[in-house]
Image (cartoon, rainbow, N blue to C red):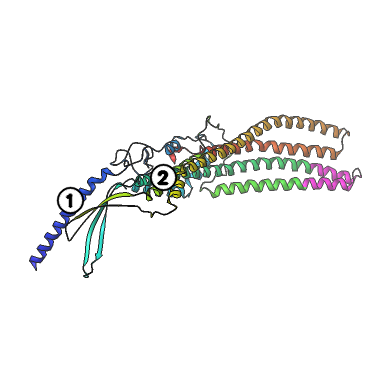
Amino acid sequence: MTRNVRHTARSRAFAMARVLATVSVVAGLGGCIEGAPFPSGRSPFSMNEVGGLTPGQPGTTAQTSLIISDLSARRSVLPSSGPYAQVAQAVLEASKGSAQAELRVARLTARAKSKNWLPQIGPSLSLTSLGDLATQLVLEQVLFDNGARKAEREYAAADVEVAAVTLSAEMNDTVHDGLSYYVSALKARDQAAVDTRAAARLGEYDRIMRERVKGGLSDMSEARVLAQKLSEMQALTAADNDAAATAMAQLQAMTARDLSGLSGLSEFDLPTPAPDPLSVKQAEGEKARTIAEAKMARAGHLPGLSASASAGSGKPNLGLSLGTSQLLGIGTADTLAALDATQDAAGARVETARQAADQRLAALGAKLRAAQAKEARDADVVAQTDAGLKMFTEQYRMGRRTLMELVTAYENFAAMERAQVGLKYDIALIKLEMAREHGILVNGSSI
């Protein structure tokens, strides 16, 4: 029994030695694989380990992703202090977005694909015709694959870029939504204050009208019209108060902080020139991923060469295999032509995304300039109307104007004042939308 045990131990030792020798032989062929360990200019990592690796590790390069470098270099246009900064920090702290998890998955995948040029090893079990179970350790090394492994690395790197852009867009959307709720609440709150003053003034006019009806100086038709105007103004006041409360409730739902005490706007300017919109960077990342996927598909239709070695109970076996992963057919030529056209199609999608982004930004820019011009113009108009209303009131007291004429004049003034109060908030909302489009509501270093 002891002799059999020693014999078995020696056999296992010899088998292990053969396996190690086979690994050395096949691993030595790894330098013959087509393409560098990482495609030029498209490493799945950056200086802050975006792809899960750091430059200097075996099998890596010091090259970084241009898209991720661009995202990292972006700086938020929001002031470092003030109400905007507090809202932005609060909503980001409470954010539960999924894009961060997706980026981590893409990074880990890219890290795994970065080693796909190394030999692969695994066990093999087979049952012979005599009923014996044969076990072997199989080692395979791709020598020539028409760039398939390199395309896999490019695809994984592009996938990291797309995930990074998605995360940046998600964080910018979160900050934009929080600030939009905040600004909308301020707008509704200030307009409600205008409505309250107008309702109080109309209430005073309504009291005068009732006294005039009692004295026979006015009829009930005028009183009913004035009462209707007062009811409409009170309803508008309630609607604005409800809008302010709703916007603040939506903001509170995005964060665990109490932001009800915040007030006022924060001023900021958009940079010139501004960075590319995030939708364009997303299209660029998807273009690279699509092209890499087409390369992998094309390589599957072309013959590849690989070396394999196996070691087990017998002596090691070395061999070469030549073949394709996809069977050839009558439509293979058209399939390859379609794959070649993928690059042009992906480039066209980038240009389409850029054109669409330019159109959105041009529309927002025109809307911003119109709102700013209207704010400056209407401020003078409101001031002049206020002065005219005071003169109109004096004329009413002297009996040269009727009460209903005064009511109509004040109603027009209140509507103009309410619209003027909301303009600065409309301008703030447009600027926030433009900043979100460019992806500059959040510092790139925090993504």
Q: Is residue 340 visible to us here?
A: yes
Tag 2 near tag 1, CB within 8 Å: no
Return the residue at label 1. Answer: 21
Q: Is residue 110 left or right of residue 26?
A: right
The 10 Å Cα crowd at callout 1, few under 14, some 14 to 19, many 20 or more, is some
Task: Find the residue positioned furthest to the bottom.
Answer: 131
Return the residue at label 2. Answer: 292
- Residue type indicated by callout 1: Ala
Q: Is residue 264 visible to us here?
A: no
Q: Does dot 1 land on a helix, a strand or a loop?
A: helix
Magenta stretch secondary structure, dominant: helix
Which disc number belongs to residue 75? none
Looking at the image, which residue is at 44% across and 34% down?
Answer: 73
Q: Is residue 205 magenta?
A: yes
Task: Find the residue positioned furthest to the front.
Answer: 330
- Range drawn in magenta: 204-230
Alpha carbon distance from label 2 to label 1: 35 Å
Residue sitting nearer the eye, 358 or 53: 358
The 10 Å Cα crowd at callout 2, few under 14, some 14 to 19, many 20 or more, is many
Q: Earlier in the sequence, mark 2 or mark 1?
A: 1
